[in-house]
Image (cartoon, rainbow, N blue to C red):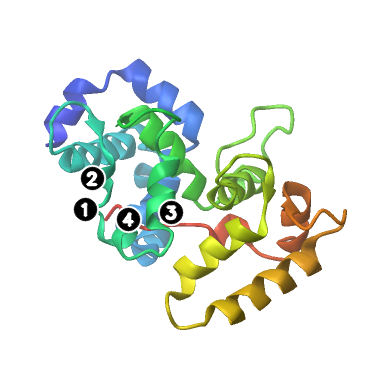
Amino acid sequence: MGSRASTLLRDEELEEIKKETGSASGFLLHELGEDNYQNSLSHPSTREVSHSQITRLYSRFTSLDKGENGTLSREDFQRIPELAINPLGDRIINAFFPEGEDQVNFRGFMRTLAHFRPIEDNEKSKDVNGPEPLNSRSNKLHFAFRLYDLDKDDKISRDELLQVLRMMVGVNISDEQLGSIADRTIQEADQDGDSAISFTEFVKVLEKVDVEQKMSIRFLH
């Protein structure tokens, strides 16, 4: 599988993907597990093989591509156990697909996956005038906000919040209790009195949460 990936991914494609998604070494946390990742950081030869790591991820991509057509469908994603058991799995899967599309290629796969990559220390000091990395705090928060904002009106309504709460808790809490939680959450977050949560209000609620590190999903082993 690795040789196939090397053949199909040209050097210029690898370089473009690396620029878009950041240093591929960050994905080692997802692939190897945290202990092995920390060990790899002490070995420059391991840390600097960005192209090799992207190629490995491409091998994982092709292993999910049951149709062998260079793209993944929603059904392909549903075979990933960590997404299958995630209460928001379907919404996360949908985030990989541009509106109106039912297939995603490797480049689109990597761009979405990059949102879940933890920020490394050397990325925090990058040129502020350069492009913002996809795994920045701001981009992670925008991504999370879109998981709630289904109608894309830039607000999280009470109904949208309730839908997510139901996914998270299942049948363990009554509708009345869920409604109370939703009302309290909106009341605490809503600063402009529109009975909804805007992105600015969403950011304010999460200002003390370590989103950069906590918003991470290990589904490539």
Q: State the residue at coordinates (60%, 81%).
A: 177
CB within 8 Å, label 1 to label 3: no
CB within 8 Å, label 3 to label 4: no
CB within 8 Å, label 3 to label 2: no
**Residue type highlighted by circle 4:** Phe
**Residue type highlighted by circle 3:** Leu
Residue 219 — which label? 4
CB within 8 Å, label 4 to label 2: no
Front-most of residues 128 and 36:
128
Residue that mark 3 sits on: 41
User: In the rendered view, would you say 30 is above or below 101?
Assistant: below
- The picture places residue 147, in percent across and down from the top left corner, at 53, 50
Examine the rendering and report whether any part of residue 182 can be seen: yes
Q: State the residue at coordinates (45%, 47%).
A: 26
Q: Residues within 10 Å of mark 4 (few under 14, many from 20)?
A: few
Disc 1 from disc 4: Cα separation: 11 Å
- Badge 4 or badge 2: first in the primary sequence: 2
Q: Residues within 10 Å of mark 3 (few under 14, many from 20)?
A: some
Disc 2 from disc 1: Cα separation: 7 Å
Q: Which element is circle 4 on?
A: loop
Q: Residue furthest front?
A: 176
Q: Residues within 10 Å of mark 2 (few under 14, many from 20)?
A: few
- Badge 3 or badge 4: first in the primary sequence: 3
Residue that mark 1 sits on: 79
Disc 1 from disc 3: Cα separation: 31 Å
Disc 3 from disc 2: Cα separation: 35 Å
**Residue type highlighted by circle 1:** Arg
Front-most of residues 29 and 114:
114
CB within 8 Å, label 2 to label 1: yes
Mark 2 or mark 1: which is in front?
A: 2
Examine the rendering and report whether any part of residue 44 can be seen: no
